[in-house]
Image: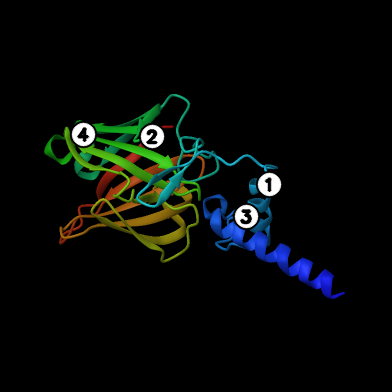
Amino acid sequence: MKKYIISVVTITIFCTSSIILNAAVIEDINNDGKIGLEEAIYALQTIAGMRPQPETVNLGGVYFDTTSDQWPTDSYLTIPTSGVMSYSGYGDYVGYTITYKFFPGQSVNGVKCVKMHKSGDCGEDCWTEDLWLAFDTRGNCRVLKQITNGVLRFEASADLVPPVFMPKKISLGQTWFCLGSVLTVEDLNASFKGYQNLLKLKADMYGSEDIDYCYYQKGKGLVIDHWNDKPIPTGSGWKLASP
């Protein structure tokens, strides 16, 4: 009996040490926010060669694998088959349009991503912007690069953490910071301008008077971008014109 106990303890210590020494293979497999038995088994199988260890790229402590450019179809983010999403203006922007174009097959510092190009025709209130987006190994969509009006504003690197554009798990009251804006989840079942079951995000442009309300619908992505500037709300913005 003593030999059996010693053997079990030895195996346990060896396995635990192996997991610690190979921490890079531990992943939240079931997305429950915890590293538990399922993750430990997966790690041991990876170490034993039963599962292939995915190639990953580390940008600022965030890991990306070869699936980083694959957008889920059941999330609040989507890419239409045409690769183009057009928005019609309302309020102060009636008669104007904003267009988002998506370009797969892009790469930033070794990470596969999708480029999103935004342009509009509403004068100085519209600007040209390019964002390179990718999903990390935990399913969060992050910004790897930003260019506004031809000027590079941000690019993730080994030392610069790519900010979260849209987290995988979303809860009421959740807040995160992205490229100069504080984003807050205000509603998970909002209704606005004929749309139902919307995710409502408040985008507070830190240090300015601009507050936007972005409305997302699963399977369609961004459907309304409501520009609600302070101190006098204008009630103007953009509504999805074509999927």
Discs 3/4, front? 3
Decide: few, some or many residues near mark 4? Use Cα within 10 Å; few <14, some 14-19, many ≥20: some
Pick whichever, 26 or 145, lies toward us.
Answer: 26
Amino acid at circle 1: Ala
- Disc marking residue 30: 3
- In 3D space, how far apart are the residues under numbered discs 3 and 1 (Cα atoms)? 21 Å
- Which mark is first along the chain, 4 or 2? 2
- In 3D space, how far apart are the residues under numbered discs 2 and 4 (Cα atoms)? 25 Å
- Which mark is first along the chain, 4 or 1? 1
Left or right, 182 with respect to 34, comes to left
Disc 4 target residue: 128
| Residue occupying the point 77% across, 71% down | 6
Amino acid at circle 3: Asn
Check if mark 1's residue and mark 4's residue have beta carbons within 8 Å.
no
Disc 2 target residue: 110
SS for callout 4: loop
Discs 3/2, front? 2
Discs 2/1, front? 1
- In 3D space, how far apart are the residues under numbered discs 3 and 2 (Cα atoms)? 26 Å
- Which mark is first along the chain, 1 or 2? 1
| Residue occupying the point 12% across, 38% down | 124
- In 3D space, how far apart are the residues under numbered discs 1 and 4 (Cα atoms)? 50 Å
Task: Give residue 137's position: percent from left, percent from top.
Answer: 50, 47
* Residue 64 drawn above or below residue 7: above
Decide: few, some or many residues near mark 1? Use Cα within 10 Å; few <14, some 14-19, many ≥20: few
Amino acid at circle 4: Thr
- Disc marking residue 48: 1
- In 3D space, how far apart are the residues under numbered discs 2 and 1 (Cα atoms)? 27 Å
The residue most toward the top is 82
